[in-house]
Image (cartoon, grey):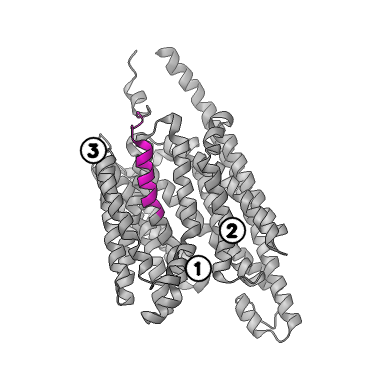
Amino acid sequence: MTATAAEQNHLSPPSHPQRWLILGVICLAQLTVLLDNTVLNVAIPSLTRELDASTADVQWMINAYSLVQSGLLLTAGSSADRYGRKKMLVAGLALFGIGSLVAGLAQTSVQLIAARAGMGIGGALLMTTTLAVVVQIFDDTERVKAIGVWSTVSSLGFAVGPLVGGVMLDHFWWGAIFLINIPVAVVGLAAVIRLVPESRNPRGERPDLLGALLSTIGMASVVYAIISGPEHGWTSGLVLLTAFTGICVLTGFVLWELHIPYPMLDMHFFRNQKFIGAVAGAILVAFGMGGSLFLLTQQLQFVLGYEPLEAGLRTAPLALSVVALNLTGLGARLVPKLGTPVTIAAGMSLLAAGLAAIALLGGNGYGGMLLGLVVMGAGIALAMPAMANAIMSAIPPEKAGVGAGVNGTLAEFGNGLGVAVLGAVLNSRFAALVPAAVGAASLPAALAAATGDGERQRITDAFASGLETSQLVGAVAVLAGGLLAAVLLRRAERAESPQADSAAAAA
């Protein structure tokens, strides 16, 4: 019997014959975009010296990329659904390549900041369309494995950016870290034009221009407040004003989307327990990963005494364990056997256990930290692909771009939230323990003001205690979030089962 129209909307599209080659192409483009989130950090001394950049200039060079990218993710996803995912992928690669060329040849700080903003536009288009294309070219039997590979590239790009930057700067001038993107963009453009099939929302809904504007301003404001908090203080006027502006604008965005007949983001998705459960889990995986890496860098340098490049190398086991487990297809094999809720609960529990291991065993040496990093990587390898698949499968295929935009936005928000919350716990604990006479604005400042070796040791111990507390807080939050996500997803599956049985009986 012929399927109904509602059923057809959710049928899995047939697999593309060249799907794995296409996946390799878009993952290469994805890796380049993600590297540029962190690659610039190691070039700060060179930029300060050669472009005569101030501290504020350097901050904007780094933040212009992430601010523009995070602000445009939903809009980029909606545009891909409406105008064609292949078109937006080509546009993203072109903008990213041109921005990289301008950045590599920049002669002033203003030129580099503008180029980074342009790269952020291309990056937003690439981040959303790559995942949307994966959903379109793989059927249900292979989609979890393909999303696992896509997630592996995300983790790898996040971790190896500083290492790639350090290697390039050892042999070339700072502009080379951008110019290496150009061959990748050119190869990617040729491959996408030749291989990737076009797909779009067949309904051709009218563009939601006001929704796009509100989501961009709101997300950019919230992310800017999170980025600025550690430097300016969470109670400073700048941070409070931008956070309040972002929340107000995002509230207006929600009200507007509920009001119009063709919303960019259908708020009815948030009535779906499967969607809500996956959203909660995705935020907290990013929360644990982003916050823990922020703390780990400080622990490796300030407590264990490693240099920046040495510290970066010692965080690599996290990414390597994610890569190893996802490329072997472990997560993809477990999801059908255990089910999405159990897989996510197991992954989040491992992530929480890894954070706890780092907190309890990593203070005295690298061995305990290494164990925690490997366990964290195993948890991320299990949970992240399952949650991305849950988010995308809760959204109709014609809205795949918006689904990818939601997934990317959650990752940006969770990373920022992890840095903000766990950083605040660290600072609060450190301020409570450090000798009052020294002052507790920061560890380097406190050490500089210390008058003897004994006082310096007490300050370092206080910082280590703050790190331990913040990691444990992160572990509890991740574990609770994982269990909540699993419960919501399980309830959604139970609710869907009678509907599926009724549909089968009617057919």
Residue to which mark 3 is pinned: 204
Looking at the rendered structure, the number of numbered marks drawn on it comes to 3
Quadrant position of residue 180? bottom left
Residue to which mark 2 is pinned: 292
Q: Amino acid at mark 2?
A: Ser
Whether residue 367 is visible to the viewer of this picture, yes or no, is: yes
Residue to which mark 1 is pinned: 229
**Which of marks 3 and 1 precedes in the sequence?**
3
Label 2 to label 1: alpha-carbon separation: 17 Å
* Quadrant where the image shows the N terminus: top left
Question: What stretch of residues is rendered in magenta?
Answer: 13-31
Label 1 to label 3: alpha-carbon separation: 41 Å
Number of the front mark, 2 or 1: 2
Q: Amino acid at mark 3?
A: Gly
**Which of marks 3 and 2 precedes in the sequence?**
3
Residue 60 as seen in the image, left or right of residue 375: left
